[in-house]
């Protein structure tokens, strides 16, 4: 089950061999994109046939209960159908994305049993599933904005004002100086300081 | 530079969703602040998905599956991604972003004991108690050991103890083998997680032992 060909002793830890012949990686990714873009039921059935039995097998191993395993299939595949647009094929394989969907569903299900809580905190513990899976389209620009706003909100108020004026309200530095009733030179120096700080902060968490 | 990280074993279990909720929240918060641990988690997710999905196994598709598939696709609407606005917390004249996983959990108001302010997170996760802790500039927690474990994730500011100084993002895991006296010069904001009371070691601070539960 692990591998067709006898390989070295511990194939799972490092360099787990993904056999391209067995896993229709490309086809699964395309199907997921079609589900997202066209709500295509045939594409979904491709995904369903591939993943549902494997999720069921995983669930039985995990919980020792067929009923719970089927619930995991239901929860995971429902999320795949409803959240497919959050998948970005440039960021990774469909199998990895579906795994994270399943892991989250399983986490919430176990929490429901242990703590009687139905708070679905997995969405906040692993937020990559929600948003950062998209990139370089208009939708994501909006998210970059959010990311940047988060850093901006930590700047001193005076610097926040100039950054917001110039980048969000698209005012000229002169207009802004007039509105804030400060010299243009001050606008420039505040902006420079703010950008330095933003660059340092964002560089820190983006490399 | 973040110097203290969760162990690889913790990161792996985190990637599998196998840790308790309170610890998962803590590791998620660290991962949000630490790009190298984020990379490791992504690598584990890839590895996990290969183990679960990338083999020749093809199960039977029986009646149940057919029914399930058509009931799922009966509704063709999609989920809108949850809008998220980062929470900024103000404390002792400083501002800090609260990592998403921590911000998402309901918490009590801050209650103040000397230079400490604590807000409890309502996670209902067995005997684990998670809190946000603010320590005012010059604040110190008397020398103590831990009857269970004590996890401190420094979110903002800095503090030091007998083993050195810590910066935002540091994930500091201590248990009964360690005793320490954390203090902060300029104040700090931490996420803390403990599963039993702190035990104070010296002089007057021993008086705190009966209320060790309340402080962290």
Image: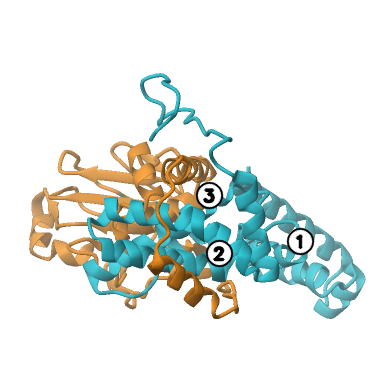
Q: Secondary structure at mark 2?
A: loop
Q: Position of residue A4 (x, y in %)?
A: 44, 28
Report crowding for label 3: few under 14, some 14 to 19, many 20 or more residues within 10 A (C-alpha). many
Which callout, 1 or 3, points to the residue nearer the camera?
A: 3
Name the colour assigned to chain A in the rendering. cyan
What chain does mark 1 sit on? A
Name the colour assigned to chain B in the rendering. orange
Q: CA distance from mark 1 to mark 3?
A: 23 Å
Residue position for label 1: A137
Q: Secondary structure at mark 1?
A: loop
Task: Report the front residue among B170 and A33.
Answer: A33
Asked if labels 1 and 2 touch by Cβ distance under 8 angstroms, the answer is no
Residue position for label 2: A130
Do marks 3 and 2 share a chain? yes
Q: Secondary structure at mark 3?
A: helix
Residue A152 vs A207, above or below: the answer is below
Residue B71 vs B213, above or below: the answer is below
The numbered mark, 2 or 1, whose residue comes first in the sequence reads 2
Q: Position of residue A119 (x, y in %)?
A: 36, 74
Task: Report the front residue among B122 and A95.
Answer: A95
Q: Position of residue B143 (x, y in %)?
A: 19, 48
Q: Which mark is residue A95?
A: 3
Q: How is the image coloured?
A: by chain
């Amino acid at each position: 089950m692990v591998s067709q060909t006898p390989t070295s002793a511990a194939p799972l830890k490092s360099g787990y061999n993904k056999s391209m012949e067995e896993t229709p990686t490309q086809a699964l990714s395309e199907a997921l994109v079609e589900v997202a873009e066209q709500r295509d039921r045939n594409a979904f059935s491709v995904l369903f046939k591939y993943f549902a039995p494997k999720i069921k097998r995983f669930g039985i191993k995990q919980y020792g209960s067929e009923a719970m395993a089927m619930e995991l299939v239901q929860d995971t595949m429902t999320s795949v159908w409803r959240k497919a647009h959050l998948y970005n094929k440039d960021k990774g394989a469909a199998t990895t994305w579906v795994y994270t969907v399943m892991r989250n569903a399983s986490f919430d299900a176990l929490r429901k049993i242990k703590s009687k809580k139905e708070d679905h905190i997995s969405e906040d513990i692993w937020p990559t599933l929600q948003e950062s899976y998209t990139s370089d389209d208009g939708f994501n620009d909006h998210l970059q904005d959010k990311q940047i706003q988060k850093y901006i909100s930590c700047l001193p108020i005076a610097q926040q004002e100039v950054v917001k004026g110039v980048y969000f309200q698209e005012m000229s530095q002169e207009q802004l100086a007039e509105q804030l009733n400060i010299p243009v030179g001050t606008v420039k120096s505040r902006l420079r300081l703010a950008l330095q700080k933003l660059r340092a902060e964002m560089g820190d968490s983006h490399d | 530079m973040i110097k203290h990280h969760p162990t690889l074993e913790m990161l792996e279990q985190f990637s599998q969703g196998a840790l308790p909720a309170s610890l998962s929240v803590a590791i998620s918060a660290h991962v949000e602040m630490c790009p190298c641990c984020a990379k490791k988690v992504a690598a584990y997710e890839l590895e996990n998905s290969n183990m679960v999905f990338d083999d020749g196994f093809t199960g039977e598709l029986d009646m149940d599956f057919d029914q399930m598939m058509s009931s799922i696709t009966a509704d063709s609407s999609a989920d809108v991604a949850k809008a998220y606005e980062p929470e900024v917390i103000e404390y002792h004249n400083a501002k800090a972003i609260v990592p998403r996983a921590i911000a998402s959990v309901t918490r009590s108001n801050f209650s103040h004991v000397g230079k400490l302010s604590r807000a409890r997170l309502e996670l209902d996760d067995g005997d684990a108690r998670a809190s946000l802790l603010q320590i005012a500039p010059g604040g110190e927690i008397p020398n103590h050991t831990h009857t269970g474990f004590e996890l401190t994730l420094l979110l903002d500011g800095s503090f030091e103890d007998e083993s050195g100084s810590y910066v935002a993002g540091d994930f500091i895991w201590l248990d009964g083998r360690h005793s320490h006296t954390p203090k902060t010069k300029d104040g700090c904001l931490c996420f803390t997680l403990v599963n039993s009371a702190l035990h104070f070691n010296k002089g007057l601070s021993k008086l705190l032992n009966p209320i060790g539960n309340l402080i962290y």
